[in-house]
């Protein structure tokens, strides 16, 4: 019987090489890393643009906050479709092809979102956008992590997932510098009084990530672990049958609990992230504050936090200890994040929340890819991650409903951040520790 994963610890006979860690990474490995990193960064850019223009969308289509939040919810729900499809393709056709197709897909529907003439049309565009968004993670993370050395996988995981926060920053800078150029121009596609063109331009910028595909196609190599497995299967005469059945492997007894627990954990992660981020720009705009400085503080701290927590997860703390510690620090940071008295206090709170509440994501790619064997390392993490996204997809909608029901934006965010942080810290201990597991072509 095939094992769920290679659980052998790193060999005691092979001590870590001397010198800086980055000298252990080859040029080919860095290219695989950056293909996923930039794909994920631009994915985040195209999604988080929405969070800056919720007020504009409410005005253009005359909808309440629950419906504005539902645009985020439907995107997250449809990520499951993309994650499942791209994950199965990644196991069958390799990691590169579904990554490129997913980037092209989400770029197209981000662009088309800007031409919406009704709320229903925008809702449909954001749903279809979610399919491509889900595919990038499912195909990209195994591509990068199967290239990298085992002992650096935690660090690579933190750096890769940090691409999301760099994308958030890019969206914030685009809103800050590009939106004002069009924010005073009348919207030719809307009859709503006061509707302006700015929010459409924000969506139109989302077509630019498609250019990344040209570089990935020519410069990035396929996963060596996946290629070796295909050679082994071909030699045994069973490649086609084995690859078609990759999703069925998840029903196997030794993988079923991995799938269920990972999905619940990712749901808690998503609940946490969207509690602290989706309505945050609106919280700042409502308080009369220009969001850019606070968002810079939050996202830069998150980038650093994910790398540090990812590195910490390679120590005795492990993946589970690092996740739990970061999540609980995030809960403790709520008063500073949303209740700081004055600009300096709020910036400090943003940094604290970014480094802790945002930092939990540093362990997500490594933990998920280590839970599944090579034969299901596309579909397993892809399904779990995006079932989690579907579970967490109600968060923007629920936060909008809480506000429509009378809660302030800050109070609604605080309640959900606390509940989700405690949930993350508990659920991560329902699964095994995975630090040090090796990826091999024969582990499935």
Image (cartoon, rainbow, N blue to C red):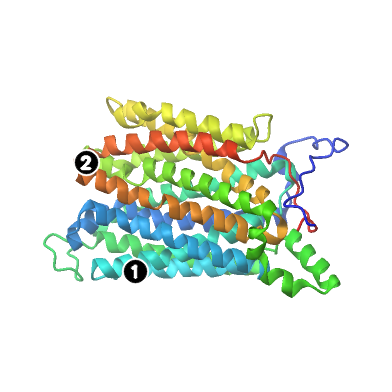
Task: Give x and y (percent) for residue 109.
Answer: 40, 69
Whole-angstrom CA distance, mark 2 to mark 1, is 28 Å
Nearer the observer, 35 or 119: 119
Nearer the observer, 436 or 117: 436
The residue drawn where x is 53% and y is 42% is 361
The residue drawn where x is 33% and y is 27% is 344
13 left or right of 111 in image: right
Determine whether the residue tagged by mark 1 lies in a helix, strand or loop: helix
Q: Residue furthest right?
A: 13
Mark 2 vs mark 1: give the one in front.
Answer: 1
Write down the quadrant of residue 399 in the picture.
top left
Write down the quadrant of residue 345 in the picture.
top left
Nearer the observer, 134 or 177: 134
Determine whether the residue tagged by mark 2 lies in a helix, strand or loop: helix
- Label 1: few (<14), some or many (≥20) within 10 Å? some
Along the polypeptide, which appears first: circle 2 or circle 1? Answer: 1
Task: Give x and y (percent) for residue 239.
Answer: 76, 72
- Label 2: few (<14), some or many (≥20) within 10 Å? few
In the image, residue 167 sits, relative to residue 231, either above or below, namely above
409 left or right of 421 in image: left
Task: Give x and y (percent) for residue 369.
Answer: 65, 51
Q: Is residue 307 visible?
A: no
The residue drawn where x is 55% and y is 67% is 85
Task: Give x and y (percent) for residue 240.
Answer: 73, 75
Numbered mark located on residue 387 in the image: none
Q: Residue furthest front?
A: 253
Q: Can you identify the residue that label 2 sits on?
A: 286
Q: Is residue 353 visible?
A: yes
120 left or right of 97 in image: left
286 left or right of 204 in image: left
The residue drawn where x is 34% and y is 69% is 124
Numbered mark located on residue 124 in the image: 1
């Amino acid at each position: 019987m095939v094992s769920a994963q290679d659980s052998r610890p790193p060999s005691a006979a092979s001590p870590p090489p001397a010198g800086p860690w980055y000298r252990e990474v080859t040029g080919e490995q860095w290219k695989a890393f950056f293909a996923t990193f930039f794909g994920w960064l631009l994915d985040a850019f195209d999604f988080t643009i929405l969070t800056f223009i919720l007020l504009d969308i409410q005005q253009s289509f005359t909808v309440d906050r629950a419906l504005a939040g539902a645009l985020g919810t439907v995107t997250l729900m449809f990520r499951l479709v993309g994650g499942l499809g791209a994950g199965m393709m990644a196991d069958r056709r390799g990691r590169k092809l579904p990554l490129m197709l997913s980037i092209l897909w989400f770029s197209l529907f981000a662009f088309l979102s800007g031409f919406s003439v009704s709320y229903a049309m925008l809702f449909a565009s954001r749903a279809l956008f979610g399919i491509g968004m889900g595919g990038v993670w499912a195909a990209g993370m195994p591509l990068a992590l199967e290239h990298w050395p085992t002992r650096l996988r935690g660090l690579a995981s933190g750096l890769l997932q940090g691409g999301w926060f760099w994308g958030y920053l890019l969206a914030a800078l685009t809103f800050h510098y590009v939106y004002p150029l069009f924010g005073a121009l009348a919207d030719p596609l809307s009859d709503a009084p006061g509707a302006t063109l700015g929010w459409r331009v924000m969506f139109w910028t989302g077509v630019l990530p498609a250019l990344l595909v040209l570089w990935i196609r020519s410069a990035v190599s396929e996963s060596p672990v996946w290629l070796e497995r295909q050679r082994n299967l071909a030699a045994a005469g069973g490649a086609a049958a084995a690859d078609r059945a990759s999703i069925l492997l998840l029903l196997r007894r030794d993988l079923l609990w991995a799938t269920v627990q990972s999905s619940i954990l990712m749901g808690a992660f998503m609940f946490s992230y969207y509690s602290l981020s989706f309505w945050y720009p609106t919280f700042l705009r409502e308080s009369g504050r220009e969001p850019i400085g606070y968002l810079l503080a939050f996202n830069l701290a998150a980038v650093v936090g994910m790398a540090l927590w990812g590195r910490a997860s390679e120590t005795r703390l492990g993946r589970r200890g690092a996740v739990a510690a970061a999540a609980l620090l995030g809960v403790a940071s709520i008063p500073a994040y949303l209740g700081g008295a004055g600009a300096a206090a709020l910036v400090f709170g943003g940094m604290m929340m970014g480094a802790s509440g945002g930092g939990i994501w540093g362990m997500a790619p490594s933990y998920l890819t280590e839970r599944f064997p090579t034969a299901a390392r596309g579909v397993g993490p892809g399904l779990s991650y995006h079932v989690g996204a579907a579970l967490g997809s109600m968060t923007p909608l629920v936060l909008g409903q809480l506000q429509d029901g009378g809660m302030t934006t800050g109070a609604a965010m605080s309640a959900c951040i606390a509940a989700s942080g405690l949930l993350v810290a508990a659920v991560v201990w329902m699964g095994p520790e995975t630090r040090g597991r090796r990826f091999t072509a024969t582990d499935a």
